[in-house]
Amino acid sequence: MAVLPLVDRRDPVLREKARRVSSFGPSLQRLIDNMFETMRHEHGVGLAANQVGSHLRIAVIGIPRQEEGEEDTTDTYVLINPEIVRRSGEREVDEGCLSIPGFRGKLQRSVKVVAKAQDRAGREYRLHAEGLLAQALEHETDHLNGTLYIDRMEAVEALRSPVLAGPEGQTPAAPHGTPDTETVWRMRRPAPPVIRRR
Ligand SMILES: [Zn+2]
């Protein structure tokens, strides 16, 4: 397994709609393994393939689970061709992104979502999620549609830097050369509103 380099926040691949996966062969398996390795290396809870320069519709998620008296474990999900099929409720969350290191912002996400996807063998499944998993599913499927979390923010005041932790996990402290908030805000492309069933 290998840690893959993250593309720069300005890379056009982050703004493209990713292509459907139709082949579940060895190269896909390798990419999935490397995405998990990269996500763990970056202390993230999710990663979309375009963040490492791939045009394929793939996301991985790893949600830490801490239960009393048990060792820390991580619930992992492979999402091939994922799609959110139902959203309900609304809540304010604090979010960041491995592709925009050093920043965090407040925005609205769904309380619950239902996603459909394929696993790494191509088998279709549905995932009912709430909390951090629901947030990660919305964040990562947005990535695969070329949408960044800043696109869903309403005001530049809700964006802040530098930060030490992000919702894709521990976003590193603002690295050398981190742009100012206005520069990041200018990258924003307002996203179409999501439809929620309450
Ligand atoms: Zn992200």
Image (cartoon, grey):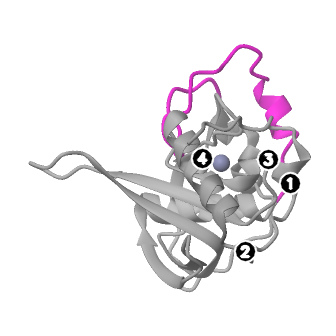
Q: Which mark is residue 161?
A: none
Q: Main secondary structure of the magenta part?
A: loop
Q: Amino acid at mark 1?
A: Arg
Dot 3: few (<14), some (14–19), or many (≥20) neighbours within 10 Å?
some
The local crowd at label 2, few if under 14, some if 14 to 19, many if 20 or more residues have their Cα within 10 Å, is: few
Give the left or right position of residue 68, taking residue 196 as reference.
left
Mark 3 or 4: in front is 4
Which residue is label 1 attached to? 15
Q: Amino acid at mark 2?
A: Ser
Q: Quadrant of residue 179?
A: top right
Which residue does the image show at 64% across and 62% down from the upper left? 26
Mark 3–mark 1 Cα distance, whole angstroms, equals 11 Å
Q: Quadrant of the N terminus?
A: top right
- Taking the magenta stretch, the answer to whether it contains residue 181 is yes
Asked if the residues shown at circle 3 and circle 1 are in contact, with their CB atoms under 8 angstroms apart, the answer is no
Q: Nearer the viewer, residue 41 or 111?
A: 41
The residue singled out by tag 3 in the image is 53
Q: Measuring 60% from the left and 47% from the top, which residue is drawn there?
A: 34
Q: Return the residue at label 2.
A: 23
Between discs 4 and 2, the one toward the N terminus: 2
Which region shows up in magenta?
161-190
Lower sequence index among marks 3 and 4: 4
Q: Nearer the viewer, mark 4 or mark 1?
A: 4
Residues at marks 4 and 2, CA–CA distance in whole angstroms: 17 Å
Of the numbered discs 3 and 1, the one sitting upstream in the chain is 1
